[in-house]
Image (cartoon, helix red, strand yellow):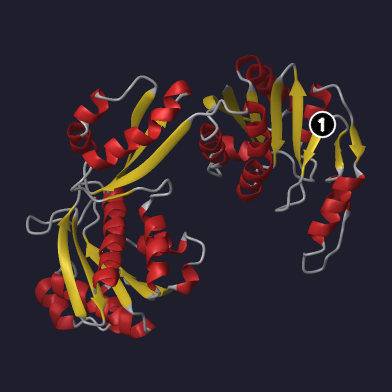
Amino acid sequence: MKAIIVTIGDEILLGQILDTNSRYAASALARLGIETVKMLSVSDKPQEIRAAADVALQQADIVIFTGGLGPTKDDLTKKTLADYFGTRLVFNEEAYGWVKEFVSHYPNGHMNEYNKNQALLPEKCTLLRNRKGTASGMWFEREGKVLVSLPGVPFEAEYLIKEEVLPRLEKRLAGDLLKYKMLTVYDVPESDLAMSLRAFEDGLPEGVALAYLPSPGFVRLRLTAKGTAVQKLDACWDALTGALLGKRFTPAESGAPEDVFAREIAALGVTVATAESCTGGNVAHLITSAAGASRYFLGGVVSYANEVKMRVLGVRAEDLQKYGAVSEAVALQMARGVRELTGADWAVSTTGVAGPDGGTPQKPVGTVWIGVAGPQGAKAQQFHFSATRERNIAKASVKALELLLDAAKHG
């Protein structure tokens, strides 16, 4: 089956917000073997919404719309789709009860006219209950094809896709599902990894394919099987992990470094803190992107200026003068300083030349020192990443998580 995902909203076309709904929906559909063949973004104008529905229903079996379901006058998706599918908007008592229950958790718990308007819904569609907001999802069917309209707020759209849309689609697809497994390989460039897996790929049976999904500091591998080849997936997976022996990898579908860090640091029962210069708070951002981070993350300091390194973290002025901010001595003192400041069991620091300017022959752009401090002392390592600022920040952040986790696991 094929799918098309349509996002509705002038704010997307103006570049004011990032479209994360399409990525989430495509990933979710892929787990059911549904191939997303196109993604569209259209304005809030009724004619654009209708035109997108025409194109999508001609070319795909499943269509997912997100956006334009709010209670204000500029949200036109609901009325447009009701007209498009030849039905009318009616007041739905069940949906009104859902809205009242949701609004009752607001600080004042007051229902206003706009809240009530969320219960005006197409008469001929299946409503999808949204427990994360007031806009119900809508499921339309025509000639064996499905169009689902969801709110544009990402956490609402994701909830409805996971809890309402996927279970319904799974029932329709019965046993005709694509299967895949993923893992993440660290510290191996994509080209080198592909060379080392060339024999493995050449030996894959028909219907099984390996895909490379590179990011700074790691590469995700996705092994996919279709049709009758699904029964061969486990054997191919075993062969893949065997071919990766000697490399550091995580056999998990959610294998992003921050996810691995969250799982393993939580299991250790220790607390951590960060002191960052060149990464500008990105290490702390990665740590706190995982739910439950408050159990182990105590806090961080972004000490971009040398004055902050000295006043807050206790870095010695003479060491900054003698060795420079990008040095082993400063990385060690930053890690020790934030550990003492927060009371954390373990702390990590980053100091480097992110670029594009500031490099010297002795410390070119991409030079980064990462320090880790713990109960038994502190140590630091120097790295040389790339000439690109964004990649340097990303790679240094991933490496900082790796070193912090490794130190906490092995003392």
Residue shown at 49%/71% (left/top)?
A: 294
Q: Which residue is mark 1?
A: 125
How many numbered discs, if any? 1
Alpha-carbon neighbours of circle 1 within 10 Å: few (<14), some, or many (≥20)? Answer: some
Can residue 281 be seen at all in this image of the molecule?
Answer: no
Identify the residue shown where x is 25% and y is 24%. Answer: 203
Residue 310 image position (x, y, % from top left):
26, 81
Indicate the quadrant containing the N terminus: top left, top right, bottom left or bottom right: top right
What percent of the width, then of the height, locates residue 149?
A: 71, 34
Quadrant of residue 182 in the image? Answer: top left
Position of residue 118 measured from the top left corner of the image (x, y, whole percent): 83, 46
Query: Which residue does the image show at 20% across and 77% down from the upper left?
Result: 378
Q: Is residue 342 left or right of residue 94?
A: left
- Left or right: 194 in relation to 263: left
In the rendered image, residue 66, in percent from the top left (x then y), is placed at 65, 37
* Callout 1 amino acid: Cys
- Which quadrant of the figure has residue 373? bottom left
Depth order, front residue of 113/136: 136
Rendered residue at 56%/25% (across/down): 176
Position of 103 compared to 358: left or right?
right
Q: Quadrant of the C terminus?
A: bottom left
In the image, 391 versus 410, the foreground residue is: 410
| Residue 2: quadrant of the picture | top right
Dot 1: what SS? loop
Left-right relation of 169 to 35: right
**367 is higher (above) or lower (below) than 210:** below
- Identity of the residue furthest to the left in this view: 362
Judge whether residue 359 can be spotted in this image. yes
